Image (tube, coloured by chain):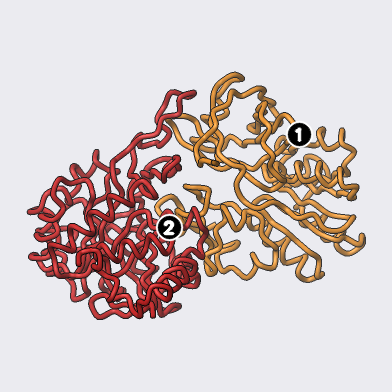
Chain colours: A red, B orange
Amino acid sequence: MLTTKLCGIRLENPAILASGILGVTASSLINAANNGAGAVTTKSISLEERKGHNNPVIVTFEAGMINAVGLSSPGIENGIEEVKEFKRRSKTPIIASIFASKTLDFGEAAKRISESKPDLIEVNISCPNVEAEFGKPFAADAKVAASVAEIVKNNTKTPVFVKLSPNVSNIKEIAKAVEEAGADGITAVNTAGPGMVIDIKAAKPILHNKMGGVSGNALRPIAVRCVYDIYETVKIPIIGTGGIMNGRDAIEMLMAGATAVGMGSAVYYRGIDVFKKVCSEIEEFMKENGYSNLKEITGRAHK
Amino acid sequence: MKLEQPIVLPIKKIVNEVSKIKTFIFDHKLDSKPGQFINLWIPGFDEKPFSISYQDDKRFAVTVACIGPFTDKICGLKEGDLVGIRGPYGNPFNLKGKNIVLVGGGCGCGPLAFLADEALKNKINVNFVIGARTKDALLFLERMKKSNIKTFVTTDDGSFGVKGFATDLLKDFLEKNHIAAVYSCGPEKMMKKVAEMCKDKKIYCELSLERYMKCGFGICGQCCMDDSGFRVCTDGPIIKGEEALNMKEFGNYRRDASGKKVKL
């Protein structure tokens, strides 16, 4: 009842572990898969090793989370090893997330990570937390986003999803551009903002990076609107990500146009077995409302 | 609603324990259990996890060895300076039986001293084996003496107590004294030895793991152990000895801030 397909890859269910959560090691990703994730996504991997920002890198606020991990990465060799290790030990599909600071490096990262045979590659062009080093995110300009999609496609045979930012004035334009450049799917969306939380006693921003991306409940209505917009514009599948906590939220995202949903912050609010919980809640809703498969739900809000 | 944000507090008191080890006391009711930790934030600098080394109804303390850039920064702070704390995080030690041994190495004596206080309240007989490289690094001898907790000391160089390792003394305890459980915190190679000795003698054992942490509440994935994906921050830091011995990572390597493996 819950099975779905992304570019020919079969998922037992649509609840995907989003990038950046629990995704540092193969063992941790397997833990998420064993707790019911239909697919898992690695934390974004770069060619070079990076330490990321000092702590604190993640805190919560009343309506969600704010993070600026700063794209820490063990480097491509270690990343390849972790993906291979996952493939040895689990049958759950794995999405390898990659990022780079230069367009050419996206191609090289895609080429290298393909050696580890991930089921999908997700291209992170939308991290909002490293502006000092990376300039404006690649996701802010349709032409730049398309050029990244194109170079990644030219360097791998693995299906490519491009992860978009909600922090743009016209997400339809960006989605169209990456589709035309050959992307096989879109992940929407990365965190919003950046935002800031200040401790008033210390009189200092709490995150070491001062600002960070907003996720969780505060992001959800924005993410749903983005997915709705993108679904109207492109034919390629969408992984809808942003503030999904329960089955109801997942159904909402599917109705906006997603084929599968990514979950991250929810692991904090409901535990690592949130994937199992959300799946049983989706199934319950489907039974109560006469749906027999997810295809009947995807994009339903457009009809 | 609980928020994962620091509570900013002034440092009430700083105690110089021994060379390069200081205890920072805060006037704040923490409600933690022995083995749990807090994330200590120096505003605008960095934040790291520390075990709680003392707690009563009004106060708590952390004990810090000044051995790196962050701990050096902490040790440069003065009474009245403001720091942030998040937590308490993680799972505590579980007391079992009426006769126990604590095995502490260096700063690992912090959470064990708190555990010793708790055990005493529960009328449990505590044998505290304190190991250190030299006499200068021995922690909490006076504090444990005041509480009437039996302490046994080893130093690597023999400058105080028995010359040798804490695990040498543990061997005697496990053979002679009907020990119900062993609790250990300190260098991982030492804890591995402790876990193996307890496994041989079929004695219940718990350890306190240490890994690089970012969030502290179970989602960043930085502190996960191979092969199970055990999250040290939320599934630990306290773990049963036998469970730790089943992890290929335990006693062998850890991961740094980038996620890369580093040999222990």
Please give the name of the residue rendered at 50% of the width and 70% of the height, measured from the top-left corner.
A35
Please give the name of the residue rendered at 36% of the width and 61% of the height, measured from the top-left corner.
A18
Please give the name of the residue rendered at 63% of the width and 56% of the height, measured from the top-left corner.
B188
x and y, in percent, of residue A205 in the image: 40, 30
Residue at the disc numbered 2 = A245
Instruction: Give the side of residue B114 with respect to residue B252, left or right.
Output: right
Identify residue type, mark 1. Answer: Asp
**On screen, residue A191 above or below A151:** above
Question: The C terminus of chain A lies in which quarter of the figure?
Answer: bottom left
Q: Within 10 angstroms of label 2, few (less than 14), some, or many (20 or more) residues?
A: many
Instruction: Give the side of residue B246 with respect to residue A40, left or right.
Output: right
Residue at the disc numbered 1 = B56
x and y, in percent, of residue A141 in the image: 11, 49
Helix, strand or loop at label 2? It is: loop
- Establish whether labels 2 and 1 are both on one chain: no
**On screen, residue A273 above or below A215:** below
Which is more toward the observer, B7 or B158? Answer: B7
Figure quadrant of residue B174: bottom right
